[in-house]
Image (spheres, helix red, strand yellow):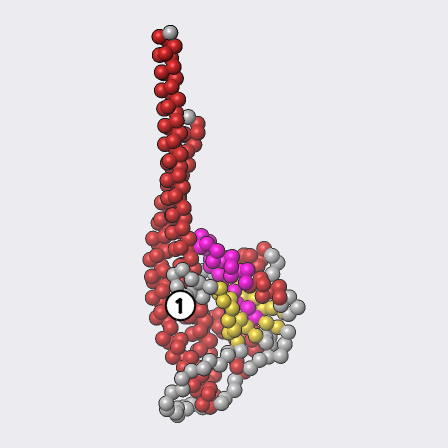
């Protein structure tokens, strides 16, 4: 009886967990749709700024400090993780890639910025110095947060003479594919674009326009990266909850079969005892 009671309790607790994961799956699905729409909506502006910037640079042959490498032993790294867990291996693989970079560049002076509590907490537990940390920005992500982070990256790049500033995050490919990538933010790498079939008249000076475009491009690029990272996080959480639901359902089925087998065995034993008693009485 004790074994039957334990199995019933396990079935009950598993059903309660499945109810929670199903609710989280539903919430994640709704959030994913919203995040995906916002990510898709940011792409045209990002592409347009990129087109204008690099077409202008190609035609004017102008140089800029944000396009030039600083000769130094300093590098910067922005690591984007989530604030919450329950999203499978999402944070684990990002932190793993970041640690590989940190270990391989241990002879350099690193300026590390974190977005998300998971990455921040891991680095602090492992005594890794963080220059700046940002968290809870995904609750209501706007371009303002991207602008603040972008301004700090530019400031560090210029004042600290950082040779390169990179970002590690989960790039959204599809609902079931979000690979971890490392991309260079500064100095801004030129992208090959189809040149526009007309020339610009620059007003005010083209140096001012290029400076403005470079700043806006970095901010638009970072904003798109943040939205992409958040979309990947929600997709990972949705998939994790879906897998949890499936595993819970399988476990409940297995436990139910086991319970029924034990009950059948118990009934058979009781019937055998009754029949045995009757036979004994007859003799």
Instruction: Reply above or below: 211 against 106.
Output: below
Q: Position of residue 212 (x, y in %)?
A: 45, 82
Q: Position of residue 244 (x, y in %)?
A: 41, 48
Judge by depth and name the residue closer to the eye, 266 or 239: 266
Residue sitting at x 54%, y 66%: 113
Judge by depth and name the residue closer to the eye, 276 or 248: 276
Q: Position of residue 74 (x, y in %)?
A: 61, 73
Q: Can the viewer see residue 137?
A: no
Magenta-highlighted residues: 76-97
Residue sitting at x 60%, y 61%: 128
Residue marked by disc 1:
142
User: Which of the 4 image quarters holds residue 3?
Assistant: top left
Q: Is residue 126 magenta?
A: no
Residue sitting at x 64%, y 70%: 108
Question: Quadrant of the image for the N terminus?
Answer: top left
Instruction: Reply above or below: 207 against 159.
Output: below
Q: Position of residue 170 (x, y in %)?
A: 46, 64
Give neighbour class at mark 1: few <14, some 14-19, many 20+ (Cα, 10 Å). few
Question: Quadrant of the image for the C terminus?
Answer: top left
Q: Is residue 77 magenta?
A: yes
Residue at the front extreme, as displayed: 283
Instruction: Reply above or below: 86 against 94.
Output: above
Q: Is residue 131 left or right of residue 218?
A: right
Q: Can the viewer see residue 239?
A: yes
């Amino acid at each position: 009886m004790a074994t039957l009671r334990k199995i019933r309790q396990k079935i009950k607790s598993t059903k309660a967990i499945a109810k929670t994961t199903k609710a989280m799956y539903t919430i994640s699905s709704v959030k994913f749709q919203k995040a995906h729409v916002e990510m898709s909506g940011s792409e045209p502006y990002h592409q347009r700024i990129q087109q204008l910037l690099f077409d202008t640079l190609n035609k004017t042959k102008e140089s800029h400090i944000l396009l030039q490498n600083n000769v130094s032993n300093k590098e910067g790294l922005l690591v984007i993780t989530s604030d919450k867990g329950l999203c499978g291996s999402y944070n684990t693989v990002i932190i793993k890639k970041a640690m590989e970079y940190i270990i391989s560049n241990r002879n350099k002076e690193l300026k590390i910025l974190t977005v998300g509590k998971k990455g921040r907490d891991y680095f602090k537990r492992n005594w890794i110095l963080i220059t700046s940390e940002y968290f809870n920005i995904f609750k209501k992500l706007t371009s303002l947060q991207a602008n603040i982070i972008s301004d700090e990256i530019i400031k560090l790049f210029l004042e600290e003479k950082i040779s390169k500033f990179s970002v590690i995050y989960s790039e959204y490919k599809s609902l079931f594919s979000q690979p971890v990538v490392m991309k260079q933010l500064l100095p801004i790498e030129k992208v090959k674009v189809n040149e526009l079939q007309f020339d610009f008249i620059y007003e005010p000076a083209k140096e001012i326009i290029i400076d403005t475009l470079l700043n806006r491009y970095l901010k638009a690029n970072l904003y798109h990266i943040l939205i992409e990272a958040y979309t990947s996080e929600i997709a990972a959480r949705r998939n994790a909850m879906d897998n949890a639901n499936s595993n819970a359902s399988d476990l409940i089925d297995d436990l139910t079969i086991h319970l029924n087998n034990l009950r059948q065995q118990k009934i058979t034993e009781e019937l055998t005892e009754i029949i045995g008693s009757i036979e004994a009485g007859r003799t």
